[in-house]
Amino acid sequence: MYFRVTPAPKGFSLFLTGPAWRADPCEFRFPEHIWNAFPAKQALINELAYICTLPTPLILKYPIVEYDTGKPQFIDFYHHCFDQAIPNLVEEIPSERADSLYHRFHSIQRKFHGDKIEGGFQARYDWNKKTIVLPLSYGKDSLLSLATLRDLGYKVIPVYIDERVLPRGNFIKEKLKRKLKNQFDLDCYIVENELHLLCDYQVLEQPLTQLHRLHIYFVYLLAMIPFCYYYRAPVIIFNNEFHHNFLQLHKDEYLCPHRYMQSTDALKGYADLVQKFSGGQVTVSNLIGVLDDFAIHRILHGRFPEFGSYQVSCHMEMNQYKRWCHNCYRCARAFIFFLAMGIDPFEMGFEVSMMPEDKKKLFVLFGSKIDIEDEYKRYVAAEEELAFLMALKRGASGPLMDLYRSKFQSGKTDIKKQEKKLKKMVFRLHCKAGSTSVEKKAAKLYKGYLKDM
């Protein structure tokens, strides 16, 4: 398996050759003026060409992979993250096992035939501390970050990564992009990552895997660097709750973070990577890490409903619906959170209720007994219990509301005390804010919002 890379007007083109597998060229495209102005093109190409195709030989079970680019500067960090994330990646796939995937990954021989490049671009002295680059997915996390940054007076450069495998989702987000421009005069840039096709199980006609999830976070990081350079923006905002640090008892008895790639340890690594690439001029911050899922929904839709109306939080490609798939945990939790806040889920784009009996499997609260070591599921169950309690008080109905009432409220008289206890657990800052000024300002803002709710 041999990956060849050639420069392209807006980025680079990569194609896969070999005795048993070939693929048409795939491009990684930036807006042309952003790419033309960037001085460290080959250094960035070396990183993106590798990390975007890291899962490909694993999915296709190839023992040798070669690149005509130089060895990536940060290959050791990429491999470390993969090792740590393996229990997350196999969790949802019955046929995958952590041990076998680990050994397969480390048995691959990798060869690089280009020049290794150390560092990225040289020092500049005109950075604008009030300008920030934000990867925008139109999920609740990045929308709350966008709203917060604007509220704090920052100029935001939103960038959406089009991975070329979600045409219906991209069609919806194109409409939201135009709406964002009309409503807030915000231009959202689009970066096209066709290389994602080379690790998509449907495109490769391979059994379902979750291996494509690993490199997404690095793409969200590396693809922002040219925008930082062009706009002299010294900060990239990452958007994930730090409750992903909570230990989960994964399949095969692995006790490790629920999602390593969204943990505080991984975030420190991202910051270190981009600082080394930029000569210490760019870093990574996270505003919403101090919050958790329900609190994020509550602040976004309570304080910034004009941004909350943009929320699209699941993959809807393989179903008949427009905005929500109605068959995943993201949809289930968003639906009950909306009910808890007194927001009509159908006004938020839902077309089907998430309260019938057959949706029970999508809630941790109604699952099997949670292991005492599983911090993540215990916390998520508490969030969901609070949401059901608040929704019940508002008169929400449905089979799952009846199940909640019979399972969790039967025999309990002091519901106010129970609600107060759960709110104290959920609606708070769950960790100390990061060291950058924008993180501290955002944490202060959120603390005030939660106190009033």
Image (tube, rainbow, N blue to C red):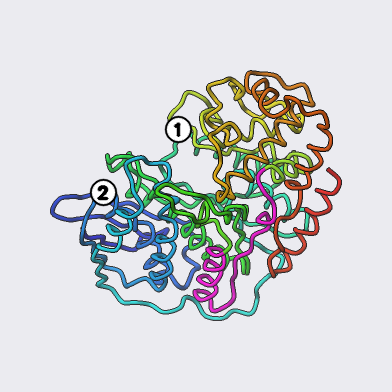
The foreground one among 410 and 285 is 410
Query: Disc 2 residue type?
Result: Asp
Q: Which residue is mark 2?
A: 24
For the residue pair 269 and 121, the one nearer the viewer reads as: 269
Quarter of the figure with residue 183:
top right
Residue 31 can be seen, yes or no: no
Is residue 289 within the magenta segment? yes
Q: Kindly report the distance in space between the C-alpha atoms of the residues bearing marks 2 and 1.
A: 23 Å
Residue 375 spot, x, y in % from top left: 59, 50
Q: Considering depth in this image, is 363 or 284 the residue closer to the camera? A: 363
Residue visible at 57% across and 78% down in the picture:
280
In the rendered image, the quadrant that contains the N terminus is: bottom left
Seen from this angle, which residue lies furthest right? Answer: 452
x, y percent for residue 113: 24, 72
Q: Which residues are magenta?
A: 265-293
Q: Secondary structure at mark 2?
A: strand
- Which residue: 63% across, 69% down? 234
